[in-house]
Amino acid sequence: MLAFEADGVVRKPNDGDAIYAVLAQGWQDAGGTYHSDATYPTCLAGEAGDAVSTDRHRVELTVIDWATGGVQPVHVAVHVRCLD
């Protein structure tokens, strides 16, 4: 699960609407190359030894909102496109 902030939108603390599961089978790097292997999107990867990136990379997500019967849906990113 990762937290994303939409451009121009200030995220409130503990805003569950900003949390996404990333299940992308394929992803696109900033140069436009499509990756369908087992690699993780470089714009979401952390530094060596870090679990996730805290650098504010720009990405475009294709998302499915999964209604689980809870208060809010689960956001599932099925495609990631790195913008920087």
Image (spheres, rainbow, N blue to C red):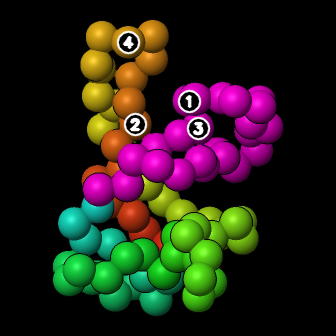
Where residue 57 sits: x, y (%)?
Answer: 65, 69
Helix, strand or loop under label 2: strand
**How far apart are labels 3 and 1 at the CA level?**
4 Å
Name the residue beneath numbered marker 2. 75
Depth check: give the residue in front, 71 or 7.
Answer: 71
Where residue 53 sits: x, y (%)?
Answer: 63, 70
Sooner in the amino-acid sequence: mark 3 or mark 2: 3
Report crowding for label 1: few under 14, some 14 to 19, many 20 or more residues within 10 A (C-alpha): some
Circles 1, 2 touching at the beta carbon (< 8 Å): yes
Q: Amino acid at mark 3?
A: Ala
Name the residue beneath numbered marker 4. 70
Sooner in the amino-acid sequence: mark 4 or mark 2: 4
The picture quadrant where one finds residue 23 is bottom left
Q: Amino acid at mark 1?
A: Asp
Circles 3, 4 touching at the beta carbon (< 8 Å): no
**How far apart are labels 3 and 2 at the CA level?**
8 Å
Viewport quadrant of the C terminus:
bottom right
Q: Which residue lies at the image location 43% right of the left edge and 69% below the top edge? A: 81
Q: Amino acid at mark 4?
A: Gly
- Residue 3 image label: none
Q: Which residue lies at the image location 72% right of the left edge and 70% below the top edge? A: 55
Instruction: Indicate whether residue 35 is drawn in magenta.
Output: no
- The residues colored magenta run 1-23
Helix, strand or loop under label 4: loop
Q: Which residue lies at the image location 59% right of the left edge and 88% below the top edge? A: 48
